[in-house]
Image (spheres, rainbow, N blue to C red):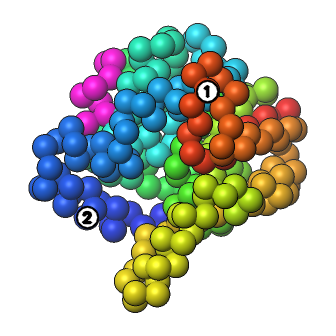
């Protein structure tokens, strides 16, 4: 069974945060900080992408539940959160409705039935995976989606000036002979080619510095919306 390349490192990172900080702070830092505000933006993105009441949502890389908390406040959906670190899942479970499900998943596939999902989201997930890992997830997402279902993913690209700082930080870490965690850029032409190969019917891209949803607050990463025919 294919598995992630970085699980052990991420588990150690989360454990260190828990030792060093109060639990709420640790769980926010574990997903990059700004727990409530980023969760609200992610929720808006899904609504913009067509999320409607009663739909089935899979949150790949749900982390400590910032999107799940925001969804619970805004819309009634069936929710499944997947992550690789038990401590993150436990915290997310403690902050959300009992009907929300959280599952430890370390395979490069989705533990759901075919044609059972309306929206699969992956925020700040493929930014830390190898391209082959991302492709395998998009492949299985196509199986899992209902016709007309959508993948909503965030990504870093060199064409967005604000994203350069992420690459520069990675370069500086490499120059200092430290081992940086993987910051993976994906160009939009790759997403288009992958989507065509996998049979998605349509791809829409939203630039990382724009926000065509009510708050006008950008996520800070570009967004791709892949629709299954």
Q: Position of residue 213 (x, y in %)?
A: 65, 23
Residue 118 visible to an observer of this rendering = no
- Dot 2: element: helix
Front residue of 203/102: it is 203
Query: How many neighbours does mark 1 have within 10 angstroms: few (below 14), some (14-19), or many (20 or more)?
Result: few
In reply to whether residue 92 is colored magenta, the answer given is yes
Which mark identifies residue 143? none
Residue in view at x 12 percent, y 55 percent: 19
| Quadrant of the image occupied by residue 48 | top right
Q: Position of residue 109 (x, y in %)?
A: 57, 51
Residue in view at x 41 percent, y 14 percent: 73
| Quadrant of the image occupied by residue 117 | top right
Q: Quadrant of the C terminus?
A: top right
Front residue of 217/102: it is 217
Residue in view at x 47 percent, y 79 percent: 172
State the residue position of label 1.
216
* Gap in angstroms between the C-alphas marked 2 and 1: 36 Å
Residue 205 visible to an observer of this rendering = yes
The residue stretch that appears in magenta: 91-98
- Dot 1: element: loop
Front residue of 95/161: it is 161
Which mark identifies residue 12? 2
| Quadrant of the image occupied by residue 178 | bottom left
| Residue 136 left/right relative to 125 | right
Q: Position of residue 26 (x, y in %)?
A: 22, 47
Q: Tag 1 or tag 2, which sits nearer the N-term? A: 2
Q: Position of residue 21 (x, y in %)?
A: 14, 49
In reply to whether residue 163 is colored magenta, the answer given is no
């Amino acid at each position: 069974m294919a598995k992630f390349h970085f699980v052990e490192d991420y588990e150690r990172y989360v454990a260190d945060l828990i030792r060093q900080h109060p639990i709420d702070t640790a769980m926010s830092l574990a997903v990059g900080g700004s727990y409530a505000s980023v969760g609200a933006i992610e929720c808006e993105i899904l609504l913009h992408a067509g999320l409607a009441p009663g739909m089935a949502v899979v949150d790949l890389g749900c982390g400590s539940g910032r999107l799940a908390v925001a969804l619970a406040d805004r819309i009634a959906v069936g929710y499944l959160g997947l992550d690789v670190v038990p401590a993150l899942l436990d915290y997310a479970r403690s902050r959300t409705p009992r009907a929300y499900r959280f599952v430890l998943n370390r395979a490069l596939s989705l533990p759901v039935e075919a044609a059972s999902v309306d929206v699969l989201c992956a925020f700040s997930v493929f930014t830390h995976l190898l391209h082959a890992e991302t492709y395998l997830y998009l492949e299985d997402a196509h199986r899992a989606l209902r016709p007309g279902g959508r993948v909503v993913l965030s990504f870093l690209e060199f064409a967005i000036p604000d994203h350069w700082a992420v690459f520069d930080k990675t370069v500086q870490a490499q120059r200092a002979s430290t081992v940086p965690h993987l910051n993976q850029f994906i160009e939009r032409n790759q997403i288009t080619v992958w989507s065509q190969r996998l049979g998605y019917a349509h791809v829409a891209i939203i630039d990382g510095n724009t926000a065509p949803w009510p708050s006008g607050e950008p996520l800070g990463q570009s967004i791709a919306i892949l629709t299954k025919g």
